[in-house]
Image (cartoon, grey):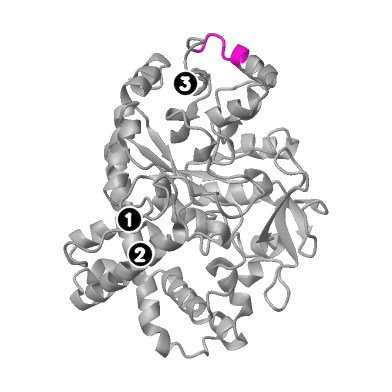
Amino acid sequence: MPLASLPSDEGVGGMGDEAYRFIDIAADMGFSVWQLLPLNPLGFGNSPYQPYSSFAGDEIYVSLAMLQRDGYLPEGFEPYACTGDADRIDYPAAREYKEKYLRIAAKNFYAKNSEKKAFSAFAAQDWVYKFGVFLALKSQNGMRAWNEWPVEQRDWIIDGKYDLTHLKDEIDYGVFVQYMFYKQWMKIKKYANSKKLKLMGDVPFYVGIDSLDVWSGRKNFLLNKDGHPDFIAGVPPDIFNDDGQRWGNPIYDWDYIKADGFKFWLDRFGYNAGLFDILRIDHFRAFDTFWKVPSSCPTARDGVWVKAPGFEFFHLLYEKMPDIKIVAEDLGGDDVPGVIALREGFDLMGMNVANFTIFSKVPTVVHQLIYTGTHDNETVLGWYQSMDEAGRKVFRSKLKGFGSPHEHIAKRMLRYVFGSVCAMAIVPVADILCLDNRAKLNSPGTVGSPNWEWRLSSFSPLKKKVKFIRELLIETKRAK
């Protein structure tokens, strides 16, 4: 369940009461893991996979109600006025609403100076001030990407020569937001853990070109002298798109990263391991081989597979962080010998998406995560509705023995997934609620609306499912 998709009276789900209520419901159902999408600042098209930073959190998730309780906002601030559908997120409207009050809270925070010790410790991290500068300069340049800024601003991160005095208030605001994000998130993590619920975070393999990661670490990427990528990421033609998927993220300079002791990756994993109990590596296969596309190509067809030093990196990672918990999103590489060897070499669980495998002869194995579908799939009901009658008949036959033939198709799919031998089973809230494709989160290879916009308008439908899910998890021996 994405954090953004939780019901909220602030326009978008975040770290307010809604997160705690969801944790309570999930725990009552018997779940032991909550998997989320990346919480980093959303990039182009509101995508969580084009983040502005691998460390920062998006300010859109900071709860105004929690700031009010901390004394940084007055009682009874103006409520969010939803002008669209209750089950859709209007990101621009939510951002405009929240920013107004976040700026008021920032002024009150600095005036009170009541959390000086904790704030100073957080702000002392290398990335925090730099991220404040990054956002301040973006704002000064009409939110254009850093590689389109005047050269003296673009190169501040290298030489420190550009005078930032006039941007002090804006930089301070950015630092405040990151502190509050971290503070509120760690409270949620503590509460979830107290309910025996582990949080599974999502680490995107790639970062956005317009990010602090690239601006401050250009040597880690294959860029030209003006800061534009020579090559970009994606995947070749697949079941989602005949032209492949042209993601546009810059490609890593693995020779430099390796020579630098994999510092870039160790820092990313180390910080995120403190925010979550388990890390899901998105696009894991790229640690073995990645699709390298010339940036001049309009599609992802004209790329080549390139070998990455995955074994060397993971050997070092586990040497430095032996207790880190990782699972691998190995889709697209689950039948590639190098990817299999890398995953098995470090005893990582891969993924089995029933939406893909139920029609195949691919066996389910114990050391896997099984899903009804991921954020890139149709909902079970939406998928079923898109089939012709012959396909529906075969699908129903595959679910023989998993519930009554008259039971809702999504419920039968839940029984199939929870009844599998896989060590971990994860299901989207949309499938628990038996929703159609209006609740689909993302269509791979497309950008913008309606991707990432679905949200739950009320907890009531989910609360009605507590008894059913609890009994199902006990029946399938996934809960006591």
Residue at mark 1: 10
State the CA–CA distance, disc 2 to disc 3: 38 Å
Eye-nearest disc, 2 or 3 = 2
Going by the numbered disc 1, the residue's amino acid type is Glu
Q: Earlier in the sequence, mark 3 or mark 1?
A: 1
Of residues 144 and 336, the one nearer the viewer is 144
Residue occupying image coordinates x 30% and y 52%: 9
Q: CA distance from mark 2 to mark 1?
A: 8 Å
Q: Is residue 371 among what the camera can see? A: no
Q: Nearer the viewer, residue 186 or 256?
A: 186
| Residue on which the image places disc 2 | 97
| Frontmost residue, 219 versus 391 | 391
- Check disc 3 and give the amino acid type: Lys
The magenta segment is 396-402
Q: The residue under label 2 is which amino acid type?
A: Tyr
Side of 72 relative to 160 (left or right): left
Q: Is residue 467 above or below residue 319?
A: above
Q: Residue at x 23, y 72 (%)?
A: 116
Label 3 and label 1: CA atoms lie apart by: 31 Å
Q: Is residue 397 magenta?
A: yes
Please state the horizontal and vertical placement of residue 394, each as a whole percent of the image. Answer: 66, 15
Q: Secondary structure at mark 1?
A: loop
Which of the marked residues, 2 or 1, is nearer the chain's N terminus?
Answer: 1
Q: Which residue in the structure is indicated by mark 3?
A: 411
Quadrant location of the N terminus in the rendered image: top left
Judge whether residue 400 is colored magenta. yes
